């Protein structure tokens, strides 16, 4: 599904976070949103998920303004995985994954087995089948994030939004999680801090800075030594992987004259 | 489903047993005969006195207790999910206190008692008070970025509850009417004494209606278990659900309080016990809380009217004795989580 962002603006009080952001994301790609802290990555994701409403501009799905979707329609098209999710309730992993079927279920408890196929597929894709009987609170951070991914996939979305999904995961879980997302085949947009991961998994990256899109394109073209210097004030080099056709980032320190 | 049927069976047995308990003890078989005769199930030989004690005096009271316990438990379950707070319930959040103030204000103004208009005015007064105190509590407790820290909500609730009880006392003293004063006193701790059939029907209807509305929002409450953003992304209109359920719980609390006064802790304990058994999914939690609340309140009221011979202990005292240790345990747990 084609996701278009048209001249979106948003401010918290007098603090302008997004100042006219536009992007046209075609079907099926994995897009990384990168940029320094406070550049508006999370805000942009929340605007697409309509957790927040744009104060200017609009977001379109296949040419239709997201504002005209009902809550149910939207939840069947767009799913969100947050940075870290917490509940005080003693849910099982299966119950968490089943939350993803809410946009398809009626108000009153109906026939059992609704969405069984979608649930099974989501659990298999996120590799959480063996966790379903476990209590949410007993899961590790990586397992929780995979359960939330399964929940989001159970919504059978056309667009998947991920807000710094790997922040609290160890390297093994980070790579495993993004590898799964990159194989999904639906439009996925992830806010990422780790540019190394963006280089490894994204089809395209969008760099946000000062509420605007600074640059966009293929990761290996966008993530360069000069970007690292301009955006983060970091002195870095981009080198080739010794064995694979992939580029990597190595930093040597904070840039000269940019000591913070 | 099996759990629900088992609990309903426990409730029925509890009703039959507690109906026999009181200043005049009536054997269970006679209780069943009285009820059976009244329901045209057979012409059992019961004395007019037995009929009067069971059918006219005890049954409306026991059923009222069941309905109030049921309603408070549903309110507690809904409020705990809505505020994401283990300690939420109508009494601790000051909603019951607000309802009491509203109802007492109506009495103090001398709106005709015993008439239909009087009952409506009383319930309306209680509703305005309940909603007002709930709004105040949330306003006082809301932190930065719109969060509702659990202990702060309870502190605000207790503060508003205290203010409400001060105003209640003030109105009673200023009013000077002895009869009104006695009614009000019974209210502040809750009492099922003197509940008649008309009120019982009203309470049962209110509790069941409350359950139906809460069940209508069951999946929305489920969706809110991971917070506002996830719920919104699941297609739930969080603000709308929150408002609707706040108003409904305030209205239900007001209906209950306007008849039997403010009774604490049942709404707090019951949902926790039920979650322990059934898990937190609301389609199961809400009906099971309803029945468990009914059972707990039926037994609390039985203790209230029979523990001290010839005297009534306010039922709120009984529920507080059962509930406050539980409250302390929850408070300690909440702190270690935070």
Image (tube, rainbow, N blue to C red):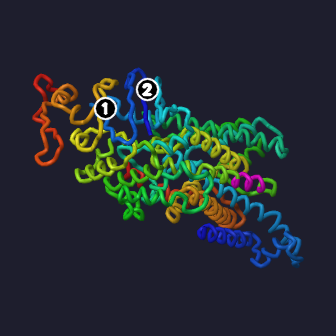
**Which numbered dot is residue B170?**
none
Which percent across, then down, holds residue A46?
A: 42, 35
Label 2, residues with CA under 10 Å away: few <14, some 14-19, many ≥20: some
Q: Chain of mark 1?
A: A
Q: Is residue B305 magenta?
A: no
Q: Which residues are magenta?
A: B200-208
* For residue A89, above or below residue B241: below
Q: Which mark is residue A6?
A: 2
Q: Which mark is residue A206?
A: 1
First in sequence: mark 1 or mark 2?
2
- Residue B209 falls left or right of residue B140: right
Q: CA distance from mark 1 to mark 2?
A: 15 Å
Residue at disc 1, secondary structure: strand
Q: Is residue A25 visible?
A: yes
Near-viewer residue (A49 or B172)? A49
> Residue, x 57% and y 62% (percent of image)?
A112
x then y, percent, for residue B4: 62, 67
Say whether residue A200 is left or right of residue B333: left
Residue drawn at x 24%, y 36% is A219
């Amino acid at each position: 599904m084609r996701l278009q962002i048209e001249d979106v603006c948003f401010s918290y009080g007098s603090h302008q976070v997004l100042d006219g952001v536009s992007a046209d994301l075609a079907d099926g790609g994995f897009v990384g949103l990168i940029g320094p802290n406070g550049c508006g990555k999370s805000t942009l994701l929340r605007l697409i998920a309509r957790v927040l409403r744009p104060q200017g501009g609009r977001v379109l799905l296949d040419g239709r303004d997201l504002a005209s979707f009902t809550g149910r329609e939207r939840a069947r098209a767009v799913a969100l995985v947050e940075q870290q999710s917490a509940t005080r309730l003693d849910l099982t992993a299966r119950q968490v994954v089943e939350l993803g079927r809410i946009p398809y279920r009626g108000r009153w408890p109906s026939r059992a087995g609704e969405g069984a196929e979608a649930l099974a597929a989501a659990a298999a894709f996120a590799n959480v089948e063996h966790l379903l009987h476990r209590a949410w609170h007993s899961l590790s951070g990586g397992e929780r994030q995979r359960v939330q991914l399964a929940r989001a996939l159970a919504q059978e979305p056309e667009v998947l939004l991920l807000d710094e999904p790997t922040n609290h995961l160890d390297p093994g879980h980070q790579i495993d999680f993004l590898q799964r997302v990159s194989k999904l085949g639906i439009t996925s947009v992830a806010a990422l801090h780790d540019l190394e991961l963006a280089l490894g998994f994204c089809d395209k990256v969008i760099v946000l800075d000062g509420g605007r899109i600074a640059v966009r394109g293929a990761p290996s073209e966008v993530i360069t030594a000069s970007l690292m210097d301009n955006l983060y004030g970091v002195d870095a080099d981009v080198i080739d992987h010794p064995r694979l056709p992939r580029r990597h980032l190595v930093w040597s320190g904070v840039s000269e004259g940019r000591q913070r | 489903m099996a759990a629900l049927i088992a609990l309903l069976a426990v409730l029925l047995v509890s009703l039959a047993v507690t109906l026999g308990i009181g200043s005049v003890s009536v054997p269970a078989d006679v209780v069943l005969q009285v009820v059976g005769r009244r329901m045209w199930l057979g012409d059992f030989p019961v004395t007019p006195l037995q009929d009067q004690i069971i059918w006219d005096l005890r049954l409306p009271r026991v059923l009222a207790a069941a309905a109030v316990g049921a309603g408070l438990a549903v309110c507690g379950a809904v409020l705990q999910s809505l505020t994401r707070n283990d300690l939420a319930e109508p009494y601790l959040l000051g909603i019951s206190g607000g309802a009491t103030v509203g109802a007492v204000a109506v009495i103090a103004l001398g709106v005709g008692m015993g008439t239909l208009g009087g009952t409506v005015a009383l319930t309306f007064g209680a509703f305005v008070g309940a909603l007002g105190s709930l709004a105040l509590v949330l306003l006082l407790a809301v932190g930065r970025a719109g969060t509702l820290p659990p202990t702060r909500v309870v502190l605000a609730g207790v503060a508003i509850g205290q203010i409400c009880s001060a105003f209640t006392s003030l109105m009673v003293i200023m009013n000077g009417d002895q009869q009104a004063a006695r009614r009000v006193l019974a209210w502040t701790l809750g009492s099922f004494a003197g509940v008649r059939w008309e009120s019982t029907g009203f309470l049962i209807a209110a509790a069941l209606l409350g359950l139906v509305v809460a069940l209508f929002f069951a999946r929305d409450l489920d969706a809110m278990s991971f917070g506002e953003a996830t719920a919104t992304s699941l297609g739930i209109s969080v603000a709308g659900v929150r408002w609707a359920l706040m108003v409904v719980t305030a209205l239900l609390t007001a209906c209950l309080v306007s008849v039997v006064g403010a009774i604490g802790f049942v709404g707090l304990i019951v949902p926790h016990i039920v979650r322990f058994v059934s898990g937190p999914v609301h389609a199961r939690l809400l009906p099971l809380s309803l029945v468990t609340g009914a059972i707990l309140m039926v037994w609390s009221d039985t203790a209230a009217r029979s523990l001290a011979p010839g005297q009534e202990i306010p039922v709120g005292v009984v529920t507080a004795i059962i509930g406050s240790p539980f409250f302390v345990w929850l408070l300690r747990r909440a702190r270690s989580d935070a």
